[in-house]
Structures are given as C-alpha cells and as structure tokens.
Image: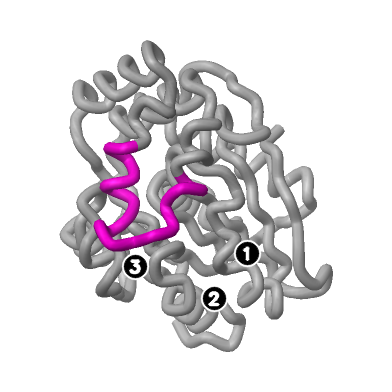
C-alpha cells in the first residue's frame, strides 16, 4: 500500500495530489495551506519513492492501480485529482480507464507520450549504477529555471529516492503512450504548463488539451518543470479555481 497522508476538513470534497518522478509527497507543501482550507487533501508517495515500498518493474497502469487501491482503502468512491509530471500521467490513465472515480482533473507539467524507451532505459541504467543523487544536477536543471534559489531541498529529496524505485518508474514512462485514451476523458480538465519547462515543454500540454474534450490550457511564465514550487501562488489559484465544487465545467 502507498504511503499517504490526509489533511484538511473531513467533510470537505477530496482532492488527491500525485507528484513527479523523483519526488515525495512533500513536493506539494507549497499548495497545502491553500488547498486544505477547502479540501480533504490526500497526498501519497508513488511506489518506490519516499516511504512507499519498492516493488520492481511496473507500468503506468500499475501506478494508477495503486491509487485505486488507496481510494478503496480510504473509502473514497469519487475524487478530484491533480498530478504533476508522473502524477499527471497516472491521472490521465485514471480519468480514461476509471472515469467513475475522477470528478475533476488537473494535469500539470506532464505528457501523454514522453521520450523513447531507449532514452528512459539509459536513465534507469545510470541510476541503478550510481544512485539517484548522481543525476541531481541534470534533474535540477529541468525542474527549475536557472535563477531559482530554492532547489537544494529538492535535490536532497531526489537523492533520497531508492534507485530501483526511480528506475522502474523511468521504464514505465518509457513504455507509456496515453494519447489514445485522451478522447475518453470526460472529467473537466485543467492542463497547466511551465513556459520554461525543458522536461515537458508547453507543446506537450497543448497536445493533451487538444486531445481531451473541453480541456482548458494555462501556460505559466517563469516556471520550469516543478511549476508548483516556482510559482506556488499562481498554481494554487488555478487549482482552486478549477477544483472547487462551484467551478463551472
């Protein structure tokens, strides 16, 4: 079972937050004050990350299945879902294949098809050989714009992710193609991109928004891949505007 934390009013609507490859649930700390004022917020560590168990090879469907198991454990039949990067990939799978469980969907700095199996296999191999800390410099350059001063805690977060957990999720991303499922998504969807994101550039968000009926696209200036960290207030405002029950589809 995934390690998870639940905060906010017990009688509020529930939103599940899913983070990026190489992060723990603390990635969402910048949004918690804003979201817990309105929502019961469920955060979790992906398998092989943080305090969740390392389980070997997996697919995006497996990672989404972990979330469904968590929802069942918490007796949550239907939730809103916000995912960034890998978390957004999981969110797209859930909204396409388990639509009854997803009310509203927010996809941040993510992609429906990213890179090649070979490129992800190379990254997985490098991490298995030298550990996640060995790629911290390259990853920080994708996560944050050059002038962002607060990257050190996130480099430490990445370095603490088990190599096998990170590598298995790399291979899951390499095998992923969520594009055929996009037209199946019926949940009202916000797609948010960082204008300066080299990992999942805005054109990836554009393709997702074009594929999901009625999706709304927002591109934030001054943000790279972890836009929720670089532009916390703006991301929180967009999430609240989209996820609150009174929001219009």
Assess disc 3: are there few (<14), some (14-19) or many (≥20) residues with their C-alpha within 10 Å of its C-alpha. many
User: Is label 3 in a helix, a strand or a loop?
Assistant: strand
243 displayed left or right of 210 = right
Residue at the right extreme of this rendering: 10
For disc 2, the marked residue is 243
Q: How many marks?
A: 3
Residue bounds of the magenta highlight: 137-154
Query: Which quarter shows the C terminus?
Result: bottom left
Q: Can residue 100 be seen in this snapshot?
A: no
| Place of residue 221 in the rendered image (x, y in percent of width and height, measured from the top left) | 25, 74
Q: Earlier in the sequence, mark 3 or mark 1?
A: 1
Q: In the rendered structure, does residue 146 fall within the stretch colored magenta?
A: yes
Q: Is residue 241 above or below residue 106?
A: below
For disc 1, the marked residue is 15
Q: In the rendered structure, does residue 104 fall within the stretch colored magenta?
A: no
| Place of residue 97 in the rendered image (x, y in percent of width and height, measured from the top left) | 47, 47
For disc 3, the marked residue is 192
> Contact (CB < 8 A) between labels 2 and 1?
yes
For image coordinates 29% across by 73% down, the residue present is: 220
């Amino acid at each position: 079972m995934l390690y998870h934390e639940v905060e906010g009013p017990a009688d509020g609507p529930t939103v599940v937050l899913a983070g990026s490859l190489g992060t723990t649930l603390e990635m969402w700390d910048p949004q918690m004050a804003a979201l817990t004022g309105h929502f019961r917020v469920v955060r979790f560590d992906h398998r092989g990350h943080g305090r969740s168990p390392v389980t070997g090879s997996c697919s995006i469907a497996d990672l989404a299945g972990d979330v469904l198991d968590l929802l069942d454990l918490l007796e949550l039949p239907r939730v809103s879902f916000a995912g960034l990067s890998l978390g957004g990939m999981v969110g797209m799978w859930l909204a396409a294949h388990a639509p009854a469980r997803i009310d509203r969907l927010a996809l941040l700095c993510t992609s429906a098809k990213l890179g090649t199996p070979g490129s992800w296999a190379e990254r997985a191999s490098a991490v298995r050989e030298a550990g996640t800390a060995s790629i911290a410099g390259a990853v920080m350059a994708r996560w944050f714009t050059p002038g962002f001063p607060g990257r050190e805690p996130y480099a430490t977060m990445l370095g603490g992710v088990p190599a096998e957990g990170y590598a298995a999720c790399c291979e899951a991303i390499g095998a992923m193609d969520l594009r055929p499922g996009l037209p199946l998504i019926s949940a009202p969807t916000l797609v948010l991109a960082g204008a300066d994101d080299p990992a999942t550039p805005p054109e990836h968000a554009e393709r997702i928004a074009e594929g999901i009926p009625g999706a709304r696209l927002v591109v934030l200036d001054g943000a790279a891949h972890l836009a929720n960290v670089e532009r916390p207030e703006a991301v929180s405002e967009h999430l609240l505007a989209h996820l609150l029950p009174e929001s219009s589809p």
